[in-house]
């Protein structure tokens, strides 16, 4: 069964007959249930105009129920879509009981990329790690239990939430509430859940939300790009939280220490590999461990946005399987999480492979492990470790290893260990990024060079040798104790997708700032006096250009001072009123698209 919003995911869930083949049916809740509009908190006036299921669609694309009939076995699998394959662990995983994991897949190329105005607002104010990509996430709650009434003795079914939002912790917590109820009460329970979700306010960054779902109330705060990295802004209130059942301190962060514990002697090298956008594959015994480890790798370079592709759980049925496993070209910049033993041979040519065993509750001190040679990796039965020929640019930081080992010996709480490791990665990434930020800021033209009657000045180009010279006196050595080949690390990074994505983002922000300063300078001019020296044709041209500037400012939400846009509208209106009536009528007409 797939409970869907108004859009299409693409080829992955566009074909309901595939879901039917796997004991799945399809209902459109918009046809089944009529809901009154809910309240929208700080954006109540805007959200009052939302249609039924608009709120649902701002959180979820659809809800899928995928069942697997063991009596039909592989005959069913031949007909299933990729979502159905990704919703089940590989047969070798042996996941008995309840298992949670997530996967990620590309939006169909024939689908509209628009997120709608609410998701666009969410994306604009979100921190880099929570910006929405042209990908969907699938959050899975899989149940496999013995059932003597079935021919082969097992019941297998997955409840899957499909969303554009990378709120991993939140959606896993949501599934812990929804899935057990669904497995007991079936379809009416999901209709009730959709009913609840469509009353939620939209997920706007900076808002503290209380979200009722099936008799439980979850309290969360959506982070913003203005939050101080490494801090939680959600404050608990004994009085205000009397009706709250669950308070989530984070909506997206995974437990870094638990994920990296099997290989934590190599955390600094793994940070370098992720920073440089190297091709990485995580081989794990279950999709829960593969997906958590991939998400931990991606988040270890925060607040820098990881700009390459990553697949927390990847199977041989994925449409990118051939693209990622071909030996005719170098592996792409992607992080894959796999569990099928077949990948041990198929991906043996990949340069960096992380093999993890069962994740233990870190209650014993991990043994020192050396980096292993790739030729020693033949099957998934190989010992856990990191298989690579990569030589780190930076010297190993023994202090963080000793600190974490001491925490294990002293039975330090897992949350504290996680906080230590997350702070370490944050400071390491910030030390690396600060020199780049400082140099890029120097490319900004001086404000005095901005003239209201000329086009905004351009940013100066990024010149690699010039940047490298700045590292001698203002490099990462100012904030980091680590020694090593920082210059080599920067040279490698400047060729990576992560630098390209970071620089494009910074360039866009700075260009918008220049546009905003130009607009503010324009608003300070006496336009009435200026138009007296120009012909009607020139004045009409000025009005059209000002309207274009206003439209751009509203569309891109340029960072102008409060009151700037209203002042510009007043200027435009004053100039129009100075023209003959026939031209006034034409210029007052709304533009046709």
Image (cartoon, rainbow, N blue to C red):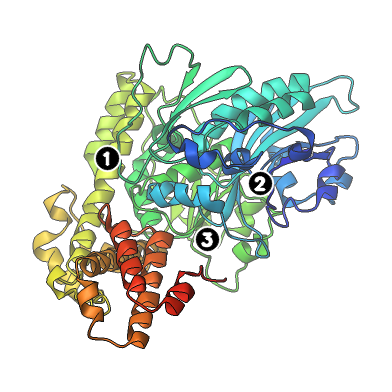
Residue that appears at 29% across and 32% down: 420
Question: Which numbered disc flags the more N-terminal residue, 2 or 3?
Answer: 2
Numbered disc 2: secondary structure: loop
Q: Residue pushed farthest left?
A: 473
Residue topped by disc 3? 350
- Crowd tier of the residue under label 2, counting other residues whose Cα lies within 10 Å: few below 14, some 14–19, many 20 or above: many
Work out whether 262 lies above or below 523. above
Q: Is residue 126 left or right of residue 432?
A: right
Q: 4 left or right of 381?
A: right
390 lies above or below 419: below
Of residues 246 and 365, the one nearer the viewer is: 246
Which of pointers 1 and 2 indicates the residue nearer the eye? Answer: 1
Spot occupied by residue 224 in the image (x, y as percentages of width and height): 36, 42
**Residue under pointer 2:** 340
- Residue contact at pointers 1 and 3, CB within 8 angstroms: no
Q: Secondary structure at mark 1?
A: loop
Horizontal and vertical percent position of residue 413:
35, 20
State which quadrant residue 321 falls in: bottom right
**Residue indicated by mark 1:** 228
Mark 1 or mark 3: whose residue is earlier in sequence: 1
Q: CA distance from mark 1 to mark 3?
A: 37 Å
**Looking at the image, can residue 358 be seen?**
no
**Residue at horizontal 80 percent and vertical 53 percent from the top:** 15
> Which residue is drawn at the image coordinates 77% and 30% (left, top)?
156
Tell me how far mark 1 sits from mark 2, CA to CA. 40 Å
Which numbered mark, 1 or 3, is in the foreground of this view?
Answer: 1
Query: Taking 24 as reference, is 331 above or below it?
Result: below
Q: Quadrant of residue 415?
A: top left
């Amino acid at each position: 069964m797939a409970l869907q919003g108004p859009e299409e995911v693409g080829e992955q869930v566009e074909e309901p007959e595939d879901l039917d083949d796997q004991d799945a049916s399809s209902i459109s809740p918009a046809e089944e249930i009529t809901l009154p509009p809910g309240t929208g908190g700080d954006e109540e006036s805007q959200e009052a105009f939302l249609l039924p299921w608009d709120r649902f669609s701002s959180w979820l694309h659809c809800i899928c129920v995928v069942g697997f009939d063991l009596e039909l076995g592989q005959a069913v699998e031949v007909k299933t879509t990729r979502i159905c394959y990704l919703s089940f662990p590989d047969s070798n995983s042996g996941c008995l009981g309840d298992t949670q994991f997530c996967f990620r897949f590309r939006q169909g190329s024939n689908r509209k990329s628009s997120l709608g105005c609410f998701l666009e607002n969410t994306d604009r104010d979100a921190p880099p790690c929570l910006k929405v990509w042209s990908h969907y996430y699938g959050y899975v709650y899989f149940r496999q239990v013995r059932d003597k009434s079935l021919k082969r003795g097992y019941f297998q079914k997955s409840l899957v939430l499909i969303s554009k939002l990378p709120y991993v912790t939140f959606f896993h917590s949501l599934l812990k509430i929804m899935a057990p109820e669904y497995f007991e009460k079936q379809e009416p329970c999901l209709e009730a859940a959709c009913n609840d979700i469509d009353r939620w306010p939209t997920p706007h960054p900076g808002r503290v939300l209380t979200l009722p779902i099936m008799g439980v109330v979850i309290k969360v705060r959506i982070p913003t790009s203005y939050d101080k990295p490494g801090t939680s802004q959600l404050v608990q209130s004994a009085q205000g939280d009397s009706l709250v059942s669950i308070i989530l301190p984070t909506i997206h962060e995974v437990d870094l220490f638990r994920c990296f514990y099997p290989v934590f002697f190599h955390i600094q090298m793994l940070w370098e590999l992720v920073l440089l956008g190297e091709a990485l594959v995580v081989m794990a015994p279950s999709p829960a461990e593969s997906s958590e480890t991939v998400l931990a790798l991606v988040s270890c370079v925060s607040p820098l946005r990881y700009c390459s592709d990553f697949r927390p759980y990847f199977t041989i049925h994925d449409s990118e399987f051939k693209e990622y496993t071909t030996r005719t070209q170098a592996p792409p910049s992607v992080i894959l999480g796999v569990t099928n033993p077949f990948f041990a041979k198929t991906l043996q040519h990949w340069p960096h492979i992380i093999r993890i065993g069962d994740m233990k509750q870190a209650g014993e001190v991990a043994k020192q492990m050396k980096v292993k040679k790739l030729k020693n990796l033949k099957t998934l039965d190989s010992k856990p470790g990191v298989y690579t020929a990569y030589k780190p640019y930076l010297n190993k930081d023994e202090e963080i290893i000793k600190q974490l080992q001491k925490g294990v010996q002293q039975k330090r709480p897992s949350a504290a260990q996680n906080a230590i490791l997350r702070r370490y990665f944050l400071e390491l990434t910030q030390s690396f990024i600060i020199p780049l930020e400082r140099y890029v800021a120097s490319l900004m033209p001086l404000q005095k060079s901005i003239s209201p009657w000329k086009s905004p000045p351009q940013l100066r180009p990024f010149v690699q040798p010039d940047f490298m010279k700045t590292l001698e006196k203002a490099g990462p050595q100012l904030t980091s104790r680590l020694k090593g080949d920082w210059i080599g690390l920067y040279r490698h990074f400047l060729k990576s997708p992560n630098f390209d994505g970071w620089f494009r983002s910074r360039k866009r922000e700075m260009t918008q700032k220049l546009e905003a300063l130009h607009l503010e300078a324009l608003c300070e001019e006496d336009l009435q006096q200026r138009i007296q020296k120009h012909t009607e044709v020139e004045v009409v041209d000025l009005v059209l250009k000002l309207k274009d500037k206003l439209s751009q400012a509203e569309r891109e939400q340029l960072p102008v001072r409060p009151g700037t846009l209203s002042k510009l509208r007043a200027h435009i209106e004053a100039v129009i009123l100075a023209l003959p009536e026939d031209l006034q009528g034409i210029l007052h007409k709304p533009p046709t698209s």
